[in-house]
């Protein structure tokens, strides 16, 4: 899966469009206990993400070897894993489309968008801090 996002703003716009698309689909009752979440990976499983049926990012795991990459490349891998998890969730939802509360999912996606941006910004800050510490030792 190719990542075409130049920065976090492009990713934010992508999530905005996805949320608007879900809003446009309408409302139907959602039996949450029957829905599976979504899982996705990148870099041969070294980056993995899970999302809940409510479109909440529930897990983001990054192998320490991947953290050594540049922040842009790491963010790209995180986006690939999160998007794969969202695609997996979407496939699960399509299989149960007749039971999906699309408006609720759209609202949840807005929360995912805000939370993922917060976590990506925090991760980028941590990577920058780590790089500065390494440079200061050298």
Image: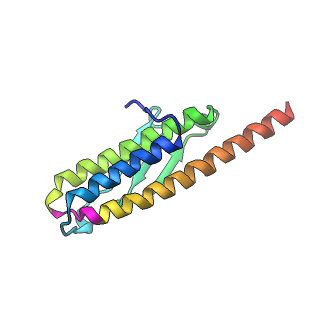
Q: Give the percent coordinates (x, y) of residue 87.
A: 31, 45
Judging depth in this view, the residue of 46 and 38 nearest the camera is 38
Q: Give the percent coordinates (x, y) of residue 78.
A: 49, 41
Q: Is residue 98 visible?
A: yes
Determine whether 106 is above or below 82 in the image: below
Is 92 situated left or right of 43 in this image?
left
Judging depth in this view, the residue of 79 and 102 nearest the camera is 102
Magenta segment's dominant SS is helix
Q: Who's the residue at 47% across and 32% down the image? A: 43
Q: Give the percent coordinates (x, y) of residue 63.
A: 56, 40
Please give the count of numbered marks on the rendered protein.
0
Q: Can residue 56 be seen in this view?
A: no
Q: What stretch is highlighted in magenta?
A: 99-103
Q: Who's the residue at 30% across and 66% down the image? A: 104
Determine whether 82 is above or below 115 in the image: above
Q: Who's the residue at 21% across and 57% down the image? A: 25
Quarter of the image containing the N terminus? top left
The quarter of the displayed image where residue 31 is located:
bottom left
Figure colour scheme: rainbow
In the image, farthest residue toward the left: 98
Q: Is residue 100 magenta?
A: yes
In the image, farthest residue toward the right: 137
Q: Give the percent coordinates (x, y) of residue 24.
A: 24, 57
Quarter of the image containing the C terminus? top right
């Amino acid at each position: 899966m190719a990542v075409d996002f130049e920065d976090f703003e492009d990713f934010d716009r992508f999530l905005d469009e996805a949320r608007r698309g879900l809003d446009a689909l309408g409302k139907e009752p959602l039996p949450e206990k029957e829905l599976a979440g979504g899982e996705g990976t990148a870099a041969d499983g070294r980056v993995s993400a899970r999302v809940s049926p409510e479109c909440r990012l529930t897990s983001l795991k990054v192998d320490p070897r991947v953290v050594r990459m540049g922040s842009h490349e790491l963010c790209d891998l995180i986006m690939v894993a999160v998007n794969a998890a969202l695609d997996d969730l979407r496939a699960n939802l399509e299989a149960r489309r007749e039971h999906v509360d699309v408006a609720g999912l759209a609202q949840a996606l807005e929360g995912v968008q805000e939370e993922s941006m917060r976590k990506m910004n925090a991760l980028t800050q941590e990577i920058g801090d780590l790089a500065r510490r390494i440079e200061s030792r050298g």
